[in-house]
Each structure stands twice: as C-alpha cells, then as structure tokens.
Image (tube, rainbow, N blue to C red):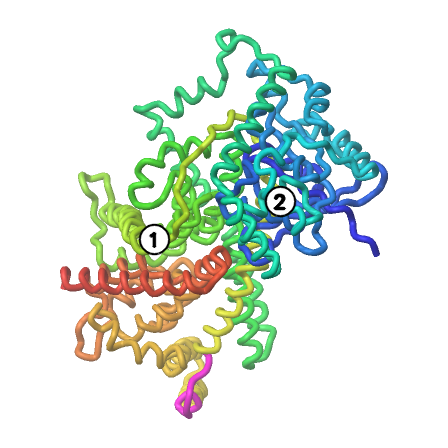
Amino acid sequence: MARNPHISLIGNPNSGKSSVFNHLTGLRQKVGNFPGVTVEKKSGICRLANKQDITVIDLPGTYSLYPRRADEWVSYKQLMSPIGGEEVDLAVVVVDATALRRNLLFVSQVIDLKIPVVVALTMTDLAKKRGLHINIRELSREMQVPVVSMNARTGKGVEDLKTTISQVLLNNFTAKDFFPVGSLAEEPIAEARLVLPNKSDYAVVHYLINHERFELSDDIQDRIERIEKKYDFNHTKIQAEDIQQRYKRIREIIKKTVEEDSVEAKRMFSEKLDAFFLHRAWGSLIMGVVLFLLFQSVFWVAEYPMNAIEEGMGALTGYLSHLLPKTWYADLLINGVLAGLGGILVFVPQIMILFGLITLLEDTGYMARISFLTDRIMRKVGLNGKSVMPMVGGFACAVPAIMSARNIENRKERLLTIMVTPFMSCSARLPVFTILAALVVPNEKIFGVLSLQGLVLMGLYVFGVVIAMLVSYVLNIFIKMKEKSFFILELPLYKQPRWNNIFITMVEKAKVFVFDAGKVIMVISLLLWALSSFGPGEKRETINKEYAQKIEKDPINTSQYERAKSAELLEFSYAGILGRTIEPVIKPLGYDWKIGIALITSFAAREVFVGTMATLYSVGEGEEEIGETLTNKMQSAKRADGSKVYTRATGFSLLIFYLLAMQCMSTLAVVKRETGSWKWPIIQLLYMTALAYVLSLITYQIFV
C-alpha cells in the first residue's frame, strides 16, 4: 500500500507552528522520539479537501539551516538527509508576519533545497496592529511559492492551507533558485555535484560544510573531504556570504511587499507592558509573584485529583485485598502492580497542570520575560534564564520539571538544569519534613505569630535552592562540552493564549510520562516488592507459625499480631537484610536498621518513609490518627541500650538527608529518558547520595 505524502511542518520558534499542527491534525497525533535522539517527535494525520490523507511531521523550531541546538540538528537532518520512508514531499514553512525578515531567511533556504514549499503566514492581525501591511499576493510572486494567510490561534485559513497543499502535491511544484548558490563557490560545488548527483546546489554546499554529520559511505566522505582540501573550502566565509546575500534580497522583497505605518503614530501594546513587567525596580518582584502563584497553583489545583487518585487506588486495593485469597500472586497484584501503577498515576495531575500553566505563560509571551529577568544570576553558576522554570517546577515535582527543560537550547545548560533540579524540595518530601519537624522542632511561635516549625520548613526549601546553585557552579567546571553558550532571546508580542493548544499539550505530556517513564517505574516497583516480600532461610516460616499460634490463642488481638508479624517479616526480608547490612554505614548519621529499611523502600517515592515507619512501629491505620500515633511511637522509640532513636541530632540529620538525596525512581527514569543514557542518572544518584551523606553527618555532629 502506498504511503501517505509526508509534509514537514517547519518554522522559527514562537511562529505559531504548534498551533498550525494542532489545527491540521486535531487529536489524530502521536508522540515519540526521533531515532537516536531524545528530541520529541510529533506526527499526525490530516485529511485534505480532496479526501487525501497526509502525514504531517512537526519538526522542532529552527531559525535557519545553520543549526546550533540539538533540536535544530534534528530538523536540519530531516530536511537534508531524511531517514528512509520519511522523505519530505512538501514543506509547510510557518512564518511570523511580525518578524518577516528573519522568517523569510529560513523560507529562502528551504526553497533552494528544491523541496516544494507552502508558506503559512501567521500573526497578520498582530502585524496590522504594529502598523505592518503585507501584500500577500505580491509576496507570493516575489518568493515564487504559495503564501496562505491564517490565524494560528483561531484556525482561520486552515482550509485554504489544506487546499493549497493538495494543489502543490498534485502539480509537484518546485520554485526556482531564490539565490544563485553556485556563485558562492563555483568550482567545489560543481565537483561535489558529481559525488552527490541528486542534490541541489544549495544542498551540496551544506554537505561540504557538514558532511561528517551525515550517514554517508566512507568513499563519499573521503571524496568530499578531498574537494574541501583541494579548494580550501572556508565554511565560515561561505556561511556568512550566503546569509548576507539572502538578507540583501529579502530586504528588497520587503520594500516591495510591506507598507509600514509611522512608528510614532502607534506605540505597541507589548512595549507598554514590557515597561511594567521588565521594570528595573519591580520587574523581579512581579516575576516572583507570578512564579509563587504558579508554584502554589500546582499544589492547590493538583491536590484534589491527586487525592481522588490515591483514594481510588486505596479503595481498589482494599476491595481486592478482601476479595482475593492471601496468596503471593494477590500480594504481587496489590502491593506490587497496583502500588506501582498508583505511583505513576498520582503524578499525572501535577504533570498536566504544570505543563498547562507553562504553556499558558509561553502563549502569552511572559515566559520569555522570565528567562530574560533571571539570566544574569543563572549564568553565574553555569545555567541560563530558561533554567528557572524547570527549577520552580521542581518544587511541585521533579518529573515534569525535568521534562520542561527541553526548551533550553544549549546542551550543557540543559544537562546542568536536569542535574540540579531534584534539589528543589518537591511535594513528596513534605510528609517526611512534616513528621520529622514535629519530632525535633518545638511547636512554638516566634513573635507570637510565626511558627518555628514553619520557619524550619521554609529554611529547608531555601537551603535546597542554595545547594542547587552551588552544585551547578561546581558541575559547570567538570562537565566539558564545547558547545558555546548564547542567550539570544527574542521577546515575542504579548498574545491571548490558545486554550486548545494548552489542552493538547497537557494530554501529550501526560501520555509521554505514563507510557515512557512509567515502564521503568513499574519495573522498579515490582523489584522493591520482591525485595520486601521475600527473604532467605527458614526464619520467615518460623515467624508465620509463631504468629499463627498467637492469633489462635488470642484472636481478639489479631490485627495487632498481623501488624507485628508484618514488621518482623519485613526485618527478615531481603530489604530488611539490606537495612541490617547498611546499618554500620548509616550509624554515624544517627540511624538504626529500621531507618535503613525506610531509606531503601522510600526510593520508590520519598513519602513511602512514613508508611514504612508506620509498619515498623505497628501503627494503626486510622487515617486521622496516623500522623499523631506515628509521631508518638517514633518519639518513644528506643535503641537496644535504652537511648532514644529520634533525638534532635538524628531528626535534623534525616531532614538534610531527605532534602538532598536522590530517592525517587520516577525522577531517575525521566532523567534517563531525557538524556538518552543511564550514565547521567547514575552519576546523579551517586553524587546526590554522597552529598546528602556528608552534610547529614556534619548536621548530626553539630547537634549531637
């Protein structure tokens, strides 16, 4: 069966490309990764007016065919040397009418690759407000390609775009050369055409510049290399002359096709807003309020669906535990599969809400202002202004926060952001902080108003940020990447958000997490269940027989015996043995073997610490009294020598450990996915654990 025509949707960042893609494909989309890279790939099916289906591939945004970022390289290679079966039949280039000169550079380059081109001209309404009047018919004539005006926000003009696509596909129309590329280097281009006979002159120029980055045979690579050396082919000079000549002609085209009102007559609404939002004095204060509201909204709004998911999973677990027989496979289903599934689904509301709010900020244009305001301080520690959003998102959950670091172009800065974002105190740490603070911090008021426990909690959040900045500064020294760092940011016009685009983004991000990171989370959940449910030797059989006899003699206290049996079985499970094994290592921090088990089991999720302690100390399961009962039990816990387990030194040491340690398999799974290798999550696990150990040891020695 013949494949659908492949349409590559390309354009500059912030040109409205994603909205055009959503209008063309609706919800007939799928998300994956381009082969060999972690850059997200979106594709979808679009039905044209003539009932023909086409496959639309949304390529990452790029400014020109001279790529710098990883995602720009993906778009570049897809246009220059597409993977088998995904050859480009037509390119729809989305052009922002308010930045016509810059956008037309990319259009002219794609034209000279001899790919059929249709220009989708967006934001014409904003261009008119800015005093720009574009003669679309004349622009189409000058560029020699069809130009369709459309509103990416409302979808107006989408049907015209579909009709134009079908006509170009039917006629297989290819424009003439926009610029006589052969004049750049006539002899090497002519000779290289013999090596690459099916490529346009402009494509040959790019193969001369970047042939090492393409999958070519050794013979072709050697022949191109010899041509470069023979003619002393200067990459930088050719690239500079190419861009200069293109901009020269683009300026002439704009003079013929664009009329501009007097700048003095209309002052842009965006400029007025920037005078307020980017003000030297209160711009940072406004940004702080916006980020605070973003952070709080993720907590406030996500709390209800997260509680609903937890209650639903709890009800399902309780129902199945009474329905199913007491067998190992029932325990596997309830405490392995369902526990792992619940650990995946409970993050979905936060992921959807965080990405929805981030998309809202991006659509309105304020996200670029946040990056601009924070760049100076971030750059001092090796990051840039775009790192602030993932780090803020980390206060809610590191999983979606790390996923949101994709908009950072520089590979090193993106990696640094991913490596330090888990230091932000996520919501999963809050139950641990709360119960430990209640153990070691007096419930007193400062000045009769401020809670001492609340100040300690706030201090932990601030300390996490400070550590993240210091670690980034150190990692910036050791991580060697030659890619240069530029913070070139165009401040887009303020716009009304596209609500449909926000909804689709929320759904896509949730699907990526559930079906990609979720696989790893489920595997590790099942592994942890096995470690906690099984153990060597006959000791566990002896424990079961012993408690069976006690229950038979004293059935009234069955529930108490069952909890005690669970705690003892856990002690002699593989997880318990690990706790006993690591006790000599964690003893200098003030921890006993039970805390060691909690450190191991809470790797599934930090909040598991509370549940593990509840089991170990045989706490009742009444929802309202769990916190109080558990606190009392932990306060009265004694060591073998009669000394208290949870002293102030041990409590503060644990607080620091849980603040800094990488105890979240979900985060590690996402880091692996985003970096494309287990190398970085393993490094992250090791250095965060080492840092947590050292600072916890120091904390214990201070308070002991």
Q: Secondary structure at mark 1?
A: helix
Q: Position of residue 619 (x, y in %)?
A: 37, 69
Q: Is the C terminus in the top left, top right, bottom left or bottom right quadrant?
A: bottom left
Q: Position of residue 204 (x, y in %)?
A: 62, 44
Q: Residue at x 54, y 61 (%)?
A: 518
Indicate the amino acid at tag 1: Phe
Q: Which residue is mark 2?
A: 204
> How many residues crowd mark 2 within 10 Å: few (<14), some (14–19), many (20+)?
many
Q: Which residue is mark 1?
A: 423
Give the left or right position of residue 382, taking residue 83 as reference. Answer: left
**Residue segment shown in magenta:** 533-541
Q: Earlier in the sequence, mark 1 or mark 2?
A: 2
Q: Position of residue 503 (x, y in %)?
A: 60, 41
Give the left or right position of residue 192, taking residue 167 as reference. Answer: left
> How many residues crowd mark 1 within 10 Å: few (<14), some (14–19), many (20+)?
many
The label on residue 221 is none
- Select label 1 or label 2 by which is in front: 2
Does 682 sit above or below residue 587?
above
